[in-house]
């Protein structure tokens, strides 16, 4: 599996273009670190041009030692020294961080936010400049270079800056460009999606255990089944229904299981899950952007 991952990262790396910009990662937590590692592994910019920022010096020192990046607790210093600002703090921390860096933000900065629910208009108003702002919705799979990220561009983002933002997220997975209004739907699908798939994997494991397989064997088979199926859909380019038909023998096991899943409304449930999460994202976005 690790080799597969390395292979797919290598494939993507072929298309990476050097961005060679100084980058401040404000909030080097799970996602900030994942993006930082992606940028380094894809050799988008020299590691010494990256500054990791946070609130705990010990954590930053470890990152710095491991990845050869600079680090600081001083956000202003990091922003002043950088051309790209990656905003990777929690949404509730963002207003405080923006207030802190506001006076260091220049018109030529590129601000890329991954904070859920924080609208471009909100960020624009807080920094009070005609700033190039990119809003994105990555997902947790970015930490294993298999992320699904959607990006939206504010009105002052140049083509070159769009390319930089796309390259950064491509370093950790697939990227799509959407209108900002669609980011709630993205949150409902790929942002929250890993949680749904974890439930599917968990249930498949339990199914195997119920039928007498050891938990270890069941876990291995369930994970590989989900991974392999996703890989086949992606690599074949075929509609999932065609692939499903290909593994459904008349009168066989799969068609009987599919009937069972249909009678419990599996597809309806998943469609509703995405719709419900989208609506919740819209609600949260309104609350966050007002605060
Ligand atoms: N996790 C996901 O699946 C996911 C998916 C899509 C989008 N996002 C977005 O990604 C962002 C980060 O999420 P995460 O899961 O990576 O959270 P996280 O691991 O908690 O990372 C946040 C980081 O911000 C640091 N921080 C806190 N206050 C700060 C300050 N005043 N100045 C600078 N750094 C500060 C924290 O430092 P300490 O650790 O030292 O406290 C932490 O390293 C969020 O806005 C979230 O909406 C996350």
Image: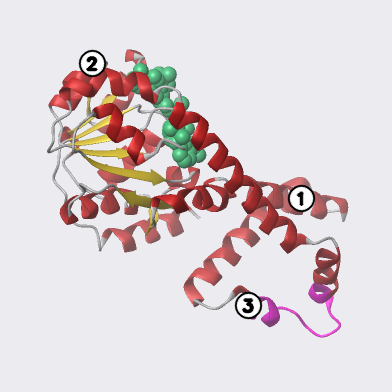
* First reached walking from the N terminus: tag 1 or tag 3: 1
Q: Residues within 10 Å of mark 3 (few under 14, many from 20)?
A: some
Category of crowding for the residue at label 1, using alpha-carbon neighbours closer than 10 angstroms: few (below 14), some (14–19), many (at least 20) = few
Apparent side of residue 83 relative to residue 165 in the rendered image (left or right): left
Q: Closer to the observer: label 2 or label 3? A: 2
**Residue appearing at x 36%, y 56% in the figure:** 9
Relative to 86, 240 lies left or right: right
Read off the residue under disc 1. Answer: 203
What residue is disc 2 on?
A: 74
Per the rendered image, the range of residues in magenta is 242-255
Assess whether mark 3 and mark 1 are in contact (beta carbons under 8 angstroms): no
Pointer 3 residue: 243
The tag earlier along the polypeptide, 2 or 3, is: 2
- Label 1, label 2: how many angstroms apart (C-alpha)? 46 Å
Q: Position of residue 224 (x, y in %)?
A: 62, 58
Residue 88: assigned label: none
What residue is shown at x 44% (from left), y 42% (from top)? 143
- The foreground one among 265 and 213 is 265
């Amino acid at each position: 599996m690790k080799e597969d991952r390395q292979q797919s990262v290598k494939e993507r790396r072929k298309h990476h273009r050097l961005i060679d910009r100084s980058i401040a990662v404000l909030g080097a937590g799970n996602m900030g670190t994942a993006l930082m590692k992606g940028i380094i592994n894809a050799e988008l910019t020299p590691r010494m041009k990256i500054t990791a920022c946070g609130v705990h010096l010990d954590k930053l020192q470890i990152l710095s030692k491991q990845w050869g990046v600079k680090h600081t607790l001083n956000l202003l210093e990091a922003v002043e020294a950088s051309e790209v600002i990656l905003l990777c703090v929690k949404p509730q921390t963002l207003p405080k961080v923006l207030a802190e860096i506001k006076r260091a933000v220049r018109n030529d900065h590129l601000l890329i936010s991954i904070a859920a629910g924080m609208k471009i208009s909100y960020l624009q108003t807080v920094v009070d400049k005609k700033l190039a702002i990119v809003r994105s919705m990555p997902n947790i799979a970015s930490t294993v270079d298999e992320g699904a990220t959607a990006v939206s561009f504010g009105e002052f983002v140049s083509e070159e800056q769009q390319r930089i933002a796309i390259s950064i997220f491509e370093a950790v997975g697939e990227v799509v460009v959407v209108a900002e209004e669609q980011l709630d739907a993205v949150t409902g699908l790929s942002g929250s999606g890993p949680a749904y798939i974890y439930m599917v994997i968990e249930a498949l494991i339990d199914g195997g255990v119920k039928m007498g397989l050891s938990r270890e064997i069941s876990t291995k088979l369930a994970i590989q089944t989900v991974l392999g199926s996703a890989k086949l859909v992606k690599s074949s380019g075929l509609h999932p229904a065609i692939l499903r038909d290909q593994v459904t023998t008349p009168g066989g096991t799969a068609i009987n299981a599919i009937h069972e899943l249909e009678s419990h409304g599996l597809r309806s449930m998943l469609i509703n899950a995405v719709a419900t999460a989208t609506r919740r994202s819209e609600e949260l976005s309104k609350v966050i952007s007002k605060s």
